[in-house]
Image (cartoon, helix red, strand yellow):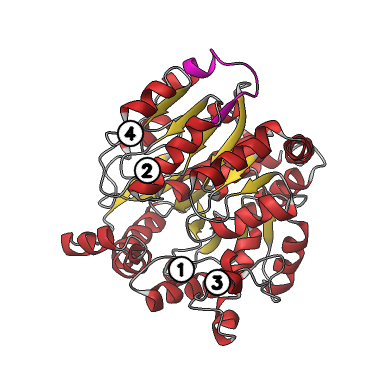
Amino acid sequence: MEEQGRKGKRVLFFPLPLQGHITPMLQLANILHLNGFSITIILADNFNTTFNTIRANYPHFTFHTISDGLSEDDKAKTDVDALFLLSLFNEKCAPHFTEALRQLVLEDPNIVCLISDSILHFTKAVADSLNLHRLVLRTGGVSSCLAYAAIPLLQNKAYFPIQGIESQLEEAVEELPPLRIKDLPIFKTYNVDALYQVIQGMIRETKASSGLIINSFEQLEQFSMSKLRDDFSIPIFPIGPFHSHFPASSSSLMSQDQTSISWLDTKTPKSVIYVSFGSLAAIEINEFLEIAWGLANRNHPFLWVVRPGLIRGSEWIELLPNEFLETVDGRGHIVKWAPQQQVLAHLAVGAFWTHNGWNSTLESICEGVPMICMPCFGDQMVNARYVSHVWKVGVQLENGLKRMNIENAIRTLMEEEEGKQIKERMLELKEKANSCLKPGGSSYESLRSLTSYISSF
């Protein structure tokens, strides 16, 4: 009967058009569709022209395309400083989004709310002008959200900008245990003030929203969740892990290499190290080569995602020496992009070397795969600290990308007693991730609350 009451009610979704943000937004849309709501996705298409695959994979959604408002000159600036995009997008997309939302609301009286990415803080004023409820999706974890919310305080206490010698970076941030100074969410940008404005706008307009939806679960971030509820006096719905609510469906903006799976099929259980640093990270050529030799020297099979654009100054893997290729022949498999959920679920995978984006971190937990943590920027620093020192389900590469450090991390996780203990803790966490979605579980009940709440609008 509950689902019948939602029939015909439509929810609008507006994602930030980056892979790590589109994926959880489409997963959330799928969850609400399975619970009886009709779905419209608003896509800012000029920024990324590869949405056709997504449309084909989600025929049960309606898609509405708008311009992102960015000029060629703007795009050239964001090529140099990708994080400047967040500030520009909030400014330039606003009029196009306003016109689209007004049109959609006029045409369909069954629209009950907008769910927008928390970074797109300009959407709050637009929704208010149309008397439309706006909920916010936080695509990262709760612990990193608290770190972002604390940035003004940390600025006042001179933690930012982060600088100093290594020993100082190891010092604890007393306001945000268990973080150290080096774990705070940092970004490399030429426009630090603009970035802080985006973060402050994100926090301010989230607190003023009709509710916050989080891709996490109570048992994973219990202490942080409690603090978030104290700090944000709005309804909060932790209903993650999103991707575990339904069978895997692709929201990838890049073509996935299915040879990853057939290659894994030839390997023994828990023997393979899966290596992927996400859709945005970039590394230097010397770091790339250290990674290569670190993998080669430990003699474990590995599946390595080398995304075009990962290595600064290089097209793809042309810089790998013949000696390396001969050493790992048959033992290493390199692809441009992999179907990650399928890879992590494969019996052959025994470890995940990751940048600790939130989606990757959650997917690894849900499949019980221990992690080697190599955070690159932003909330990845916070996530890696929690993986290695709170949940203790991985090891972190701390002192630069040197092959010896890499070899030590692999040895610890794949060969030593400490690695066995990490795997045992990870299997316990996997069980918690699975149980929270079952009837009576925390995310199951939170989703029931969310669907009832949206139906009440």
Find the distance from the CA under tag 2 to the CA under tag 1.
21 Å
- Disc 1 and disc 4 in contact, CB within 8 angstroms: no
Camera-nearest label, 2 or 3: 3
For residue 121, the mark is 1
Distance between the Cα atoms at labels 2 and 3?
Answer: 28 Å
Q: Position of residue 55 (x, y in %)?
A: 37, 35
Instruction: Give how far apart the Cα atoms at labels 4 and 3 are.
Output: 43 Å
Counting from the top left corner in percent of width and height, residue 162 is at 50, 74
Q: Position of residue 237 (x, y in %)?
A: 68, 55
SS at mark 4 in the image: loop
Relative horizontal placement of residue 235, taking residue 118 as reference (left or right):
right
Q: Residue at x 48, y 49 (%)?
A: 401
Q: Residue furthest top?
A: 266
- Label 3 Cα neighbours within 10 Å, binned few <14 / some 14-19 / many ≥20: many
Q: Which three-letter amino acid code belongs to the residue tagged 3?
A: Ile
Q: Earlier in the sequence, mark 2 or mark 1?
A: 2
Please tell me which of labels 4 and 3 falls first in the chain. 3
Name the residue beneath numbered marker 2: 63
For residue 361, which quarter of the picture? Answer: top right
> Hey, what amino acid is under mark 2?
Phe
Is 309 included in the stretch rendered in magenta?
Answer: no
Residues shaded magenta: 262-273
Q: What amino acid does circle 4 point to?
A: Leu
For the point 49% across and 43% down, the residue is: 403
Q: Which residue is mark 4?
A: 320
Helix, strand, or loop for circle 2?
Answer: strand
Q: Which residue corresponds to mark 3?
A: 203
Which residue is at the far right? 440
C-alpha gap between disc 2 and disc 4:
42 Å
* Label 2 CA crowd tier, 10 Å (few <14, some 14–19, many 20+): some
Tags 4 and 3 touching, CB below 8 Å: no
Q: Amino acid at mark 1?
A: His
